[in-house]
Amino acid sequence: MVKGLDNGWMDVHRRIESPNADRRPDGTQISLLVIHNISLPPNEFAKNYVDHLFTNCLNPSFHPYFEEIGHLRVSAHLYIDREGIITQYVPLNRRAWHAGESSFDNRTCCNDFSIGIELQGADHIPYTEIQYSRLGCLTRQLQSFFPLITLDRIVGHSDISPGRKTDPGDSFDWKRYLTLLQSDDAF
């Protein structure tokens, strides 16, 4: 499911390149993993418009909420849907536009030094078993590529943008996820 790294691209289920990315600052070491959630339309999972949002093709006429966000230029490195399908939008060696105004460990602009993973979900809706499993595998793989991403450097969007963002929300089971990462035989 998740294997090697080829020019920043992982061997995952789907690859759709987002134009919403750029170069990381020279000399930047990737040292932070940010967990997000997204559902488009909000709180709905049947139709998935994340590909459209991350590739600047979101049609505002499809849903009233899309009129509010259709102008945004955003992306994430990786996305895990409710069925566990992993899509990569941005090579890991490039900067995805996922964190916005943010700060961690007295550093601003978290996009510069982080990887962003979106989970298809909402703050108040439990995530699926397969999402936790895939997120755990993916995280371990990322930690093997970027050893500076230690357990204390895995955060939610709400942690780096408090007051502005709430994801991955109360429904995300941090204890379960971190226990998976610490277990030698979990995967």
Image: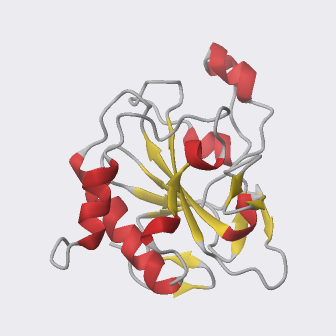
Image quadrant where residue 143 sits: bottom left
Seen from the viewer's position, the closer of residues 87 and 144 is 144
User: Where does residue 178 sit, x and y in percent of width and height?
Assistant: 32, 61
**Residue 91 drawn above or below residue 46:** below
User: Where does residue 72 sit, x and y in percent of width and height?
Assistant: 77, 37
Residue at figure coordinates x 73%, y 21% from the top left: 68
Image quadrant where residue 133 sits: bottom left
Q: Residue furthest top?
A: 64
Q: What scheme was used to colour the molecule?
A: secondary structure
Residue at figure coordinates x 66%, y 40% from the top left: 53
Residue at figure coordinates x 52%, y 66% from the top left: 153
Image quadrant where residue 113 sits: bottom right
Q: How many marks?
A: 0
User: Where does residue 55 sit, x and y in percent of width and height?
Assistant: 69, 48
Residue at figure coordinates x 39%, y 47% from the top left: 81
Residue 3 falls left or right of residue 30 = left
Q: Residue furthest left?
A: 185
Q: Quadrant of the N terminus?
A: bottom left
Residue 168 falls left or right of residue 101 = left
User: Where does residue 124 sit, x and y in percent of width and height?
Assistant: 38, 27
Residue 23 falls left or right of residue 16 = right
